[in-house]
Image (cartoon, rainbow, N blue to C red):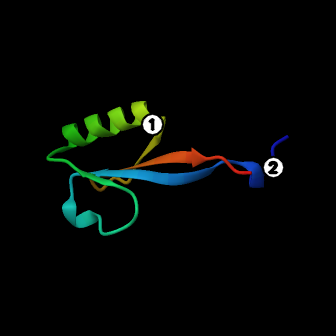
Amino acid sequence: MTALADAPTPVMFAIVTTRRDAVHGGMAPVFYCEDEQERDRIALWLTRITNAIVHDLHNGTLILTVNQATR
């Protein structure tokens, strides 16, 4: 049985947003999109390429995370 402490740690991989005012600084790359259709398309391709997971913040912004293996 895997203990909770042994679970992978999610790491923010990228931010995809339609709102330039919603994202300030940080270490993850930010992809600014003209509309929600472009935002969703870019997020979909990034998840296919990187095997990331999309989280919708319901404010025009999606964050993509990947699981970091623990040792």
Sooner in the amino-acid sequence: mark 1 or mark 2: 2
Residue that extends furthest to the right in the rendered view of this protein:
1
Q: Residues within 10 Å of mark 2 (few under 14, many from 20)?
A: few
Image location (x, y in percent) of residue 71:
74, 51
Image location (x, y in percent) of residue 19:
21, 58
> Could you tell me if the residues under marks 1 and 2 are in contact, i.e. CB atoms within 8 Å?
no
Give SS at disc 2. loop
Which residue position holds label 1? 50
Image location (x, y in percent) of residue 6:
76, 50
Residue that extends furthest to the bottom in the rendered view of this protein:
25
Q: Residues within 10 Å of mark 1 (few under 14, many from 20)?
A: few
Q: In this rendering, would 42 be left or right of 56?
A: left
Which residue position holds label 2? 3
Give SS at disc 1. helix
Q: In this rendering, would 47 be left or right of 33?
A: right
Residue that extends furthest to the top in the rendered view of this protein:
48
> Hey, what amino acid is under mark 2?
Ala
Q: Residue at point 71% right, 48% down?
A: 7
Q: Residue at point 47% right, 41% down?
A: 53
Residue 14 or 54: which is nearer the viewer? 14
- Up the image or down, 7 lies above or below 21; here it is above
> Hey, what amino acid is under mark 1?
Thr
Q: Residue at point 33% right, 69% down?
A: 25
